[in-house]
Image (cartoon, grey):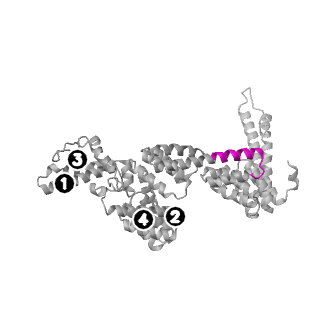
């Protein structure tokens, strides 16, 4: 056996032989099995040699001895707990591919010496090997804080920042690497990444300009190039998803929104958009998932009704699931119940505000967002939600196309067309003979037609949902003319602005 085995303390002998024992037992069983097989097959001319079996076992001895060596060092490391021993043991485990065990040793090393930059660097290496870049980043920052001239750590951090789309910070790291007397390899990598970052900065500016100009196809193409390098950039993926939505490519939008929901913790906005897309496409699977979540949390409430903490937490999640599942009327009372016990719960305030918007109670939504803002001043979602609620309130005080057709805000296209057909037949001016009634019917008929035009056009509906009226000449220059032309080409003969005293000819295909 190994020379150190002779000096193993009695308390450690059991550990060592626990490692060896399975090998010995396996050998005994193999030999015994061979003998039994030999006894039962005397009539056969061929037999497996015991020496052959033993030889196969011996080929594994070097690997077994390495494991024993690692097991023994683990015992001594656990006994004296030195930082160096933990680092060395972590390195061996990392080399053997045992990432979780290696990580536990580097955790111990960091706890043992919080100023040991190498312990942080080794732990960051394991995090990266495990695909946990978010955890690696603060460790690399700590390494640079403790040892500013550690170019390898700074270069790795720059690469992570670049992938996250944090371009200014990444460029700062690459420039400092170039000024710190790097190796030839590090210099080439830093210069290459700096050039790449400069190009991406240019593309980001172009993509934003294209998006602002509503040139969504060009913006999406520019964002494609950006995301090839900045694979974890949430902002770019969210913008590209919005471009895809405007272009009607919902499958691609779903792919980006799913990615952002994983990259950004508690990305409720992404989940909301996903749910809306699935619902509008007639795919209720995601909505059903929210319903399933509600059922599970309700079971928790029933199981632990007297444990206030668990009950409140379950109801908070029910509130969230209902709000995201477009079940505003059900969400409001559950959210309110949670807020009675926890009035400053920002997440529940946001969820209830969204539920109020779904129920068109915009003033109540504004109150909730304003309350939430007092406790979370820099929350972007609160600001966006408040702006949305205020726009919708202002819009509701003017013309509401959903109310004109008598459909909900999340109505699907087929529901809108069905409502339009029914109302258009009801308010057709030819149905009225009295001049005053005919005049009122004419106005009503045009409103119905405009509502159908807006709500069945994805771009116009999106604008209306964001508080703009596509049919209002003051806020949408040129859209009114677009509306008039649209009737002649898209409504198959239905033209309320035609010549003569309302000579309507139309069908409802």
- Residue at image mark 3: 497
Q: Is residue 50 magenta?
A: no
Sequence-first tag of 1 and 3 = 1
Region in magenta: 179-196
Q: Secondary structure at mark 1?
A: helix
Q: Secondary structure at mark 2?
A: loop
**Residue 372 placement (x, y as % from top left):** 48, 69
- Of circles 2 and 4, the one toward us is 2
Residue drawn at 60 percent across, 52 percent down: 164
- Residue at image mark 4: 353
Foreground pick, 362 / 126: 362
Residue 307 shows in the view: no
Separation of marks 1 and 3 at Cα, in angstroms: 14 Å
Which quadrant of the figure has residue 358? bottom left
Which quadrant of the figure has residue 45? top right
Whether residues under marks 1 and 3 lie with C-beta atoms below 8 angstroms apart, the answer is no
Sequence-first tag of 2 and 4 = 4
Q: Is residue 1 left or right of residue 94?
A: right
- Residue at image mark 1: 441
**Residue 147 placement (x, y as % from top left):** 76, 59
Sequence-first tag of 1 and 2 = 2
Q: Residue furthest top?
A: 45
Q: Which mark is residue 379?
A: 2
**Residue 406 placement (x, y as % from top left):** 28, 56
Mark 3 is surrounded, within 10 Å at the Cα level, by few (under 14), some (14 to 19) or many (20 or more) other residues, namely some
Q: Secondary structure at mark 3?
A: loop
Foreground pick, 179 / 349: 179
Sequence-first tag of 1 and 4 = 4
- Of circles 1 and 4, the one toward us is 1
Whether residues under marks 1 and 2 lie with C-beta atoms below 8 angstroms apart, the answer is no
**Residue 77 placement (x, y as % from top left):** 79, 59
Separation of marks 1 and 4 at Cα, in angstroms: 37 Å
């Amino acid at each position: 056996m190994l020379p150190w085995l002779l000096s193993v303390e009695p308390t450690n002998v059991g550990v060592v032989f626990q490692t060896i024992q399975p090998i010995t037992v396996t050998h005994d069983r193999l030999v015994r099995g061979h003998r039994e097989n030999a006894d039962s097959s005397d009539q056969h001319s061929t037999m497996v040699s015991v020496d052959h079996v033993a030889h196969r076992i011996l080929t594994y001895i070097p690997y077994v001895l390495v494991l024993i060596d690692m097991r023994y060092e683990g015992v001594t490391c656990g006994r004296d707990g030195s930082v160096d021993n933990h680092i060395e043991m972590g390195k061996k485990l990392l080399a053997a591919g045992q990432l979780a065990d290696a990580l536990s040793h580097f955790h111990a090393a960091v706890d043992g010496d919080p100023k040991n930059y190498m312990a942080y660097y080794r732990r960051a290496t394991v995090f990266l090997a495990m695909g946990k870049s978010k955890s690696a980043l603060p460790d690399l920052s700590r390494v640079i804080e403790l040892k500013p001239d550690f170019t390898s750590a700074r270069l790795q951090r720059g690469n992570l920042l670049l992938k996250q789309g944090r371009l200014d910070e990444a460029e700062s790291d690459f420039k400092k690497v170039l000024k710190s007397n790097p190796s030839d390899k590090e210099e080439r990598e830093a210069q290459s990444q700096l050039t790449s970052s400069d190009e991406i900065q240019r593309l980001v500016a172009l993509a934003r300009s294209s998006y602002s100009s509503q040139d969504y196809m060009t913006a999406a193409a520019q964002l494609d190039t950006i995301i090839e390098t900045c694979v974890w950039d949430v902002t770019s993926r969210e913008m590209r998803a919005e471009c895809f939505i405007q272009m009607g490519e919902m499958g691609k939008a779903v792919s980006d929104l799913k990615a952002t929901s994983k990259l950004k913790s508690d990305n409720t906005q992404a989940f909301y958009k996903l749910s809306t897309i699935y619902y509008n496409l007639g795919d209720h699977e995601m909505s059903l998932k929210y319903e399933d979540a509600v059922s599970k949390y309700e079971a928790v409430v029933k199981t632990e009704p007297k444990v206030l903490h668990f009950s409140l937490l379950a109801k908070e999640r029910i509130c969230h699931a209902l709000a995201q599942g477009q079940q505003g009327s059900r969400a409001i009372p559950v959210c309110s119940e949670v807020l009675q016990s926890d009035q400053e719960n920002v997440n529940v305030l946001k969820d209830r505000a969204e539920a109020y918007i779904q129920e068109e109670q915009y003033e109540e939504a504004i109150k909730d967002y304003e309350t939430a803002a007092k406790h979370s001043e820099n929350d972007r979602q609160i600001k966006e939600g408040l702006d949305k609620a205020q726009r919708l309130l202002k819009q509701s005080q003017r013309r509401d196309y959903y109310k004109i057709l008598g459909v909900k805000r999340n109505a699907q296209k087929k529901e809108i067309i069905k409502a339009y057909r029914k109302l258009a037949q009801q308010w057709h001016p030819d149905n009225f003979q009295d001049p005053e009634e005919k005049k009122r019917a004419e106005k009503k008929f045009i409103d119905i037609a405009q509502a159908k035009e807006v709500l069945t056009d994805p771009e116009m509906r999106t604008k209306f949902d964001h508080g703009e009226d596509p049919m209002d000449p003051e806020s949408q220059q040129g859209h009114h003319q677009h509306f008039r032309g649209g009737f002649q080409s898209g409504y198959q003969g239905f033209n309320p602005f035609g010549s003569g005293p309302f000579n309507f000819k139309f069908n409802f295909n």
